[in-house]
Amino acid sequence: MKKTTWFILGGLLVALLLAGVASNFASGSPDGLDSASTKGCTLNENDEITGGSCMAQNAKDNETSDSPLADYQINGIGNSYVSTGLAGVAGVLLTFLVGGGLFWLVRSRKQPAETRE
């Protein structure tokens, strides 16, 4: 195998390990947008709005909230660590396949000898 192939496979392996294992150690705290959108509201222990006035009161569920990979987990798997890890692995593989397919489509192709001038 060429060095390039080993490099790509090594990078894919590292990405799969990070997505499958390290994704479970990501912060569960809300990001900046979530935090800013709830300023002015009162939240209960489940982070549901119980009073006040804020941007988040008008928020609606995403149309894809019931999709198989919603909320960074795979629906139907009871163990949240396994579910999150598998969702990360599926995301890496899907991204690799789409990116690899696009590179394959746009790569420069050598012209056959008979068509060269």
Image (cartoon, rainbow, N blue to C red):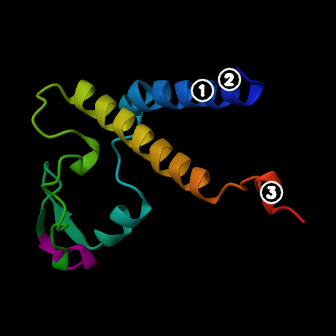
* Residue 4 screen position, x and y as percent: 73, 31
In the image, what residue occupies the spot 80% across and 57% down?
A: 114
Contact (CB < 8 A) between labels 1 and 3? no
Label 3 crowd bin: few (<14), some (14–19), many (20+), radius 10 Å: few
- Dot placed on the residue nearer the N-terminal end, 1 or 3: 1
Q: Does residue 26 sit above or below 50 in this rendering? A: above
Magenta region: 51-57
Q: Is residue 19 magenta?
A: no
User: Closer to the camera, 42 or 82?
Assistant: 82
Q: Which residue is mark 2?
A: 6
Identify the residue shown where x is 9% and y is 35%.
Answer: 76
Image quadrant occupied by the C terminus:
bottom right
Q: Viewer-nearest of labels 1 and 3?
A: 3
| SS type, badge 3 | helix
Q: Residue farthest to the front?
A: 114
The reply, left or right, for residue 13 in relation to residue 85 is right
Q: Quick one: which residue is furthest to the right in this view?
A: 117
Residue that badge 1 annotates = 9
Q: Quadrant of residue 62?
A: bottom left
Res 102 quadrant in image: bottom right
The quarter of the picture where residue 10 lies is top right
| Label 3 sits on residue | 114
- Of pointers 2 and 3, the one earlier in the residue sequence: 2
